[in-house]
Amino acid sequence: MSLVYAGVCSHGPGMTGRAHLVENTARRDELFAKMARMGEEIAASGAEALLVVAAEHFANFFMNNMPALCIGMSAESEGPIEDPAWLRIPRTRVPGNADLSRRIVREVMQTVDTAYAEEWKFDHGIMVPLHFLTPDYKLPVVPVNINCQGPPLTPLARAWAFGEALRRACDIVPEKIALLATGGISHWPATPDSGKINEAWDREFLARLLRQDRDAVLSYTDEDTYRDAGQGGFEIRTYIAAAAAARGCGELQYYTAELPLFAVGCTVARFAIA
Amino acid sequence: MSLYQLQKFLYVLNREPDAQHQYRQDLESLLSRYMLTAEEQQALREGDIGLLYVLGVNGQILMHYAAFLGIAWFDYLQLMRDGVAKHGPVRAGVYAMTGGGARFTSEGGVP
């Protein structure tokens, strides 16, 4: 039927794996409440499937055959690939909708060269958001990936075009679709600098994104992002795709840089569907 | 090419239960499937996170490997700092240490 929801959120593995170690429990609990609220909003939208635009971390793709863009087309997926005790999320199987995926892929391909995959393993980039948003794992998930890990990375303009194509595909299928983009803004995850956050950079990026300032959002170079926002900042591609899909301006529902143990400025935002 | 092989080894290990079983039962056989230097092979035999980090293994791959080895989070971060102190700056990739070895969280106790 249409895209009925579009939002973005963080996905750091520390949000589940290290939550028990956080000293600033007030901020942690605020974040978790906002994530739960996001889950309620997705449920209230009547969504019949959740399209998760993720920045995966070598759960499925490697530099032997790295797609710039890929859409999952499997009946179900398993996750997390990480040690469940480390991530503190039990390994489970999450339903997909292969037929819906196929129709989305076909439409996206009209304008964007996307790969597809009939098998998909979820890492923390999808499992952490699902843990908060659909904890019973019953809502079918269509996984989508933008290469934010193995340079050369997907150009930002292509991420925007991909979001536009996803929107067009969502609007021609009969199902109600919620789109969630997950990723970090500035962060230096999985390095000794984990916990470093450039809050000013984050807030400027979010301001550009949420007001749908396409040119300003696409003006970042990878060199600038690496310098100012770390390699984790490359994940802005997923947020950019969500903005392009939604077309409407966004509302920042939560942001804090006061949870460095989660290794990211924790973000929850929702776009108007226009 | 060798860093590619090193990362491929870890990529497969991180996501394939069969490879994880073989890692624990017959590591040498698993190592023989990849074109690795002696230094890389030794780093994998010893689970040397610091050296693997300096060699340029992508942090997302290395983080999962450290979890597989049962290394606690703050120990993992410190092992990378120790690796830089011992072997010098990260030699490849986009996961270089940029904070001079500083810590950015208050949790984790005094180093």
Image: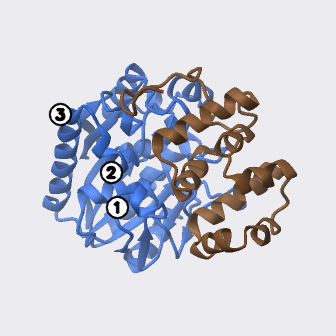
Chain colours: A blue, B brown
Residue A132, percent from left and from top? 25, 55
Where on the picture, by quarter, is residue B13? bottom right
* Tag shown at residue A16: 2
Residue under numbered circle 3 = A26
Q: Amino acid at mark 2?
A: Thr
> Disc 2: which chain?
A
Looking at the image, residue A128 lies above or below residue B58: below
> Disc 3: which chain?
A
Is residue A212 visible to us here? no
Residue A188, percent from left and from top? 51, 33
As drawn, is A39 to the left or to the right of A6?
left
Viewer-side residue, A222 vs A188? A188
The 10 Å Cα crowd at callout 2, few under 14, some 14 to 19, many 20 or more, is many
Viewer-side residue, A272 vs A69? A69
Q: Secondary structure at mark 3?
A: helix
Viewer-side residue, A50 vs B11? B11
Q: Secondary structure at mark 2?
A: helix
Is residue B72 visible to us here? yes
Residue under numbered circle 1 = A89
